[in-house]
Amino acid sequence: MLIATHCEDEQMVRHNEALMREKYGENVPINLHPIIRNEEACYKSSSMAVALAKKHNTRLHILHISTAEEMELFRNDIPLSAKQITSEVCVHHLYFSAEDYIWAGTQIKCNPAVKAKRHREALLTALLDDRLDIIATDHAPHTWKEKQNTYFQAPSGVPLVQHSLNVMLEFYQNGLISLEKIVEKMCHAPAECFRVEGRGYLDEGAWADVILVDLEKEWTVNPGNTFYKCAWTPFQGHTFQGKVEATVVSGHLAYQHGQFFEDKRGKIAV
């Protein structure tokens, strides 16, 4: 059985929270989030999980890795199919850094925290050299009102599913990753890692899951083209190059040019 775990040391996080509450009360600045949920808390937990997995020969997958220090826990000298311990990185940890709390505030409050630039750079390097196996997303669609609370009251999480491919295409447009690597990490590797039959590849006889993208088309994120039910995104007003024109799910046209379609069984395919 595969064990998937979110690794942060809760005792260390609670200790850091207490220190900040003592200093700031309820008005802890959001830019201290990566200090409260710091790299030490991540590494202490993930290194323990890896040690236990090795000891008991357990199939382990560690979710949303966020620190440079954790990269030493993973290997790239064997293929994914042979790995007992795998890992993933989320698009927001690749895209944002601690500097972005200045303008984004609690919009990018998530656990594990978005951290300093050095971590972001290390994560991309490890993704490209296959120490990190999968590109994933957070998806916690809290309301805008909920996210406007003070530090301790604002929930953690970011709506990201809709724009995850666009984020990675921006990396591609900037020459930081190839299209082939994006497909490998967002399609092939998840199917292989979680043994999802008939998905993740464009193979004869497999389920037809296809995204059609115009790589040249620029578009700007606005409320009219944001489909999250929470109706907000940290990418509001950002212009991406590369637009999803159509999505086919299990052989059914699910989306095209801003419209969603029902499949043959009368269910909305999204």
Image (tube, rainbow, N blue to C red):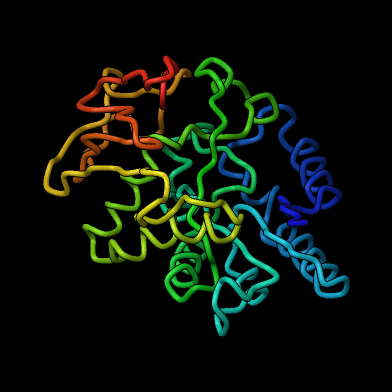
Instruction: Report the side of 56 relative to 164 (left or right).
Output: right
Residue 85 percent coordinates (x, y): 69, 68
Relative height, residue 213 to residue 142 (above, below): below
The one nearer the camera, 215 or 201, is 201
Instruction: Report the side of 237 relative to 81 (left or right).
Output: left
Q: Residue at x 59, y 60 (%)?
A: 193
Relative height, residue 201 to residue 77 (above, below): above
Residue 196 percent coordinates (x, y): 56, 51
Residue 11 percent coordinates (x, y): 86, 49
Q: Which residue is drawn at 28% across and 52% down?
A: 169
Q: Residue furthest left?
A: 216
The one nearer the camera, 95 or 160, is 160
In the picture, the quarter occupied by the C terminus is top left
Q: Which residue lies furthest to the bottom in this view?
A: 77
In the picture, the quarter occupied by the N terminus is bottom right
Instruction: Report the side of 124 relative to 86 (left or right).
Output: left
Q: Which residue is drawn at 82% across and 72% down?
A: 57
The one nearer the camera, 246 or 109, is 246
In terms of image quadrants, where is residue 142?
Answer: top right
In terms of image quadrants, where is residue 77?
Answer: bottom right
Q: Residue at x 48, y 51 (%)?
A: 198
